[in-house]
Image: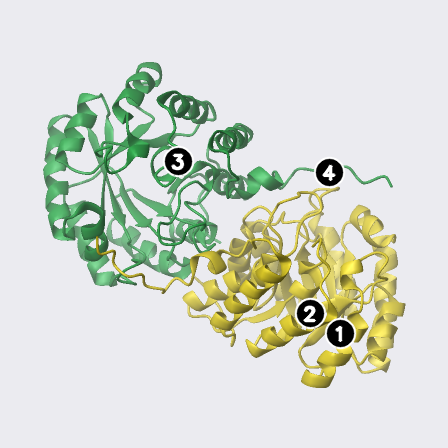
Chain colours: A yellow, B green
Amino acid sequence: MNLPGSVTINDVMLRDGLQLEDKILTVDEKYDLAGRLIEADIPSLEIGSFVHPKFVPQMANTGELFESLLEKYGSNNFITLVPNLKGAQRAVEHGLAQLNFVFSASNTHNLQNVRQTTEESLDQFEAIKEFCDEHRVKLDVSIATTFGCPFEGQIAENRIQSIVKRVTESEPNIVTLADTTGMANPKQVYYLMNLLLEQYPDIRFNLHFHNTRGMGLSNVLAGMEAGVTSFDTSLGGLGGCPFAPGATGNVCTEDVVHMLHSMGIKTGINLDELIDTSASLRDILGHELSSSVLKAGKYDRKYPVPTK
Amino acid sequence: MNLPGSVTINDVMLRDGLQLEDKILTVDEKYDLAGRLIEADIPSLEIGSFVHPKFVPQMANTGELFESLLEKYGSNNFITLVPNLKGAQRAVEHGLAQLNFVFSASNTHNLQNVRQTTEESLDQFEAIKEFCDEHRVKLDVSIATTFGCPFEGQIAENRIQSIVKRVTESEPNIVTLADTTGMANPKQVYYLMNLLLEQYPDIRFNLHFHNTRGMGLSNVLAGMEAGVTSFDTSLGGLGGCPFAPGATGNVCTEDVVHMLHSMGIKTGINLDELIDTSASLRDILGHELSSSVLKAGKYDRKYPVPTK
């Protein structure tokens, strides 16, 4: 079993995770949670988005939040989502040094999400990349619905191939392949990533899985077996699926870190602090989270033998 | 990625799954659920146990249940748990043709569970095997806490090795290695099963995982990669962990079958009927189940594009 010695975790709870929550967190609540994740040595955090608050009220005040965060922690830890060039300009004005542009491999999903064809989004990505290069800002790109679309079903592999080819020509910082609604399976992940890592040895690929159908951690495992060492995860498994109310969201940060540590794979993250922070998140939101480790504790926890 | 072409599923909902439920199902409810699982082409079912109802009231009337089931379906589909020779005798009197004897690799856990040392249980297993051979009844054996004990922690690999050596000398029908409280990780599963399959090419190994810490499906994947093609699962993910109230139970039958089918691995099972039966189980028990596929639907389900 081919497994890496270490893995980089990017927590997306403060972006993807919060997007479908009814409760809108205050800037202070977000600031505190981000601080605690940094204290737990999470190496990278995706926070908020420079999307109009009319569309995603949960992401309002992202600029204000970053003013405090960047002042205290500097810009090394943070990524923010930008939907277009205007969003990128605003993010850079606020001092962000790493942006993530998201679009969808499925044309139908992209039209629904950002009212553009995939082709138009690819053009937009190139314009944003040019802007970022001018301002010496890193630009990542996330390709949503890579492993399946809720409207179109499976996306043809040659379509994924040609999209990846196109985005890599602009030399993005990170290319994330996202399983936006939890349709990926481990075999699919393994074979696609094997292929792409061979074709693009110089590109840093990152994987973004949802646990909608329970396969999230298996997909992380398959990704590692193919050679991927970078994953998006969400504290408490926060995040949802607009098509399946009540379904599980993103793969849970503490569950992924726990699985990695149990296999001796390093993340540099303090798992105990992570679990404590997840408990706080549960209290703030006022509902149970889909995190397994939060409920059950770590695998190496011993229980006292009952005396009766 | 080395994956099998087909896998055999043994559903244990009507045994392990029900053991910690507050609601005690009637014989009729159990009979109907078993019938629906057989209609969904589940190849093997572990049902009830011939344990004294004083200890496990959820398993009462197992004999009565089997009278109806065996009359309608014959004995090919059914396994039942026996805790000792007396239980085996009663099961055989009721017409059962395949029994499963469970004991624990952890001495502390075995003492707690069946008030015997592991050594005493091994002796008992040999006595039951002799009885089963005389009556031409198949005897399986399940080694609980193989991948970790809530009291002792990790069980030394050479202890597992010597227990497996001892039980295989009696030529059991199936040897199940059980992760009783969800402590296994995929790397551990892969390496142990690789080793055992090489050492015992003629033994049929079966794996029994709990999803307590979210690693259940990853462990199934790792088991298959090592060459295992037989798994215990529980409809709706029913089953629990007495040490972690609210934690997830056994790996969920429909989630495992769904993952296998999505990777093109055959089970012979009708997944749609399985999901329908899980919905009925949820209604009978009156609480949500930890099944992902029950909430989210299958990966290849397409949703209509929103029109507004």
Dot 2 lies on which element?
helix
Residue A31 lies, in percent from the top left, at: 69, 73
From the viewer's perspective, is A84 left or right of B239? Answer: right
Which mark is on residue A36?
Answer: none
Task: Please tell me whether mark 2 or mark 3 is closer to you in this view.
Answer: 2
Judging by the rendered image, the residue that carries numbered circle 2 is A30
**Residue B303: image tag:** 4
Label 4 lies in what chain? B
Disc 1: which chain? A
- What is the secondary structure assignment of the residue under circle 1? helix
Would you name the residue on which mark 3 appears? B13
Q: CA distance from mark 2 to mark 1?
A: 8 Å
- Residue A57 versus residue A98 in the image, above or below: above
Assign a secondary structure to mark 4. loop
User: Viewed as shown, does residue A69 lie left or right of A213?
Assistant: right
Q: Secondary structure at mark 3?
A: helix
**Amino acid at circle 3:** Met
Q: Are marks 2 and 1 in contact (CB under 8 Å)?
A: yes
Marks 4 and 1 sit apart, C-alpha to C-alpha, by 36 Å
Q: CA distance from mark 2 to mark 4?
A: 33 Å
**Labels 4 and 1 within one chain:** no
- Which tag is nearer the camera, tag 3 or tag 4? 3
